[in-house]
């Protein structure tokens, strides 16, 4: 093995080795972070059934770390406003359905015959909108008191 020719060369080799170790650590860290990160969600697709956003009250309970007495108070407040929320849904659902039906009708002239048949079949099997205060078909009932 050849002896180091000068202290400057030794410092240069030391700096190169140190920089290489730093770069390797950075690459390893990025790889580890990507590997351990949760899978990316495709925001263009709706969440699967039952995986929609949780009710606002459930988020409040979790985010505010409410105790049992506070949760009961929240449930009581929710019950007192249930009629107001149901009225909003009763008024809104038909309007939303009318707009969605209009969108389908405006799209219809741009569909091929096989797509029109698929649209008609889909309309026949599509569930109706949920009634106020009731969950959509296949969903559990809202949390009770």
Image (cartoon, rainbow, N blue to C red):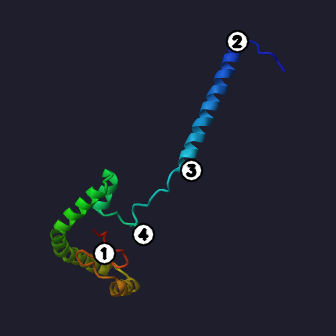
Q: Is residue 75 above or below residue 94?
A: above
Taking the spot 65% from the left edge, 25% from the top edge, the residue there is: 16
Give the alpha-carbon distance from disc 3 to disc 2, as whole Å.
42 Å
The percent coordinates of residue 53 (x first, y second) are 34, 63
Question: Which of pointers 4 and 1 lies earlier in the amino acid sequence?
Answer: 4
Labels 3, 1: front one: 1
For the residue pair 2 and 125, the one nearer the viewer reads as 125
Query: Alpha-carbon neighbours of circle 3 within 10 Å: few (<14), some, or many (≥20)?
Result: few
Q: Secondary structure at mark 1?
A: loop
Q: Secondary structure at mark 2?
A: helix
Q: Secondary structure at mark 4?
A: loop
For label 4, the residue is: 48
Labels 4, 1: front one: 1
Query: Do labels 4 and 1 touch, CB within 8 Å?
Result: no
On screen, residue 80 versus residue 47, left or right, reads left
Question: Which of pointers 4 and 3 lies earlier in the amino acid sequence?
Answer: 3
Residue farthest top in this picture: 6
Taking the spot 64% from the left edge, 30% from the top edge, the residue there is: 20
Taking the spot 30% from the left edge, 75% from the top edge, the residue there is: 135
For the residue pair 44 and 117, the one nearer the viewer reads as 44
Labels 3, 2: front one: 3
Taking the spot 60% from the left edge, 36% from the top edge, the residue there is: 25
Query: Alpha-carbon neighbours of circle 4 within 10 Å: few (<14), some, or many (≥20)?
Result: few
Q: Is residue 68 above or below residue 115?
A: above
For label 2, the residue is: 7
The percent coordinates of residue 116 (x first, y second) are 35, 85
Give the alpha-carbon distance from disc 2 to disc 1, as whole Å.
77 Å
Give the alpha-carbon distance from disc 4 to disc 2, as whole Å.
65 Å
Residue 82, by quadrant, is bottom left
For label 1, the residue is: 135
Identify the image quadrant of the C terminus: bottom left
Query: Alpha-carbon neighbours of circle 1 within 10 Å: few (<14), some, or many (≥20)?
Result: few
């Amino acid at each position: 093995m050849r002896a180091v020719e000068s202290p400057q060369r030794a410092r240069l080799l030391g700096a190169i080795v140190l920089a290489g170790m730093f770069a390797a650590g950075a690459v390893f860290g990025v790889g580890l972070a990507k590997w351990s990160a949760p899978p990316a969600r495709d925001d263009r697709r709706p969440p699967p059934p039952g995986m929609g956003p949780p009710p606002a009250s459930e988020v409040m309970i979790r985010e505010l770390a409410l105790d049992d007495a506070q949760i009961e108070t929240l449930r009581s407040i929710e019950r007192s406003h249930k009629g107001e929320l149901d009225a909003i849904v009763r008024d809104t659902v038909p309007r939303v359905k009318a707009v969605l039906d209009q969108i389908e009708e405006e799209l219809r002239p741009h569909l091929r015959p096989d797509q029109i048949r698929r649209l008609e079949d889909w309309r026949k099997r599509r569930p109706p909108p949920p009634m106020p205060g009731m969950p959509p078909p296949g969903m559990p009932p809202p949390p009770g008191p």
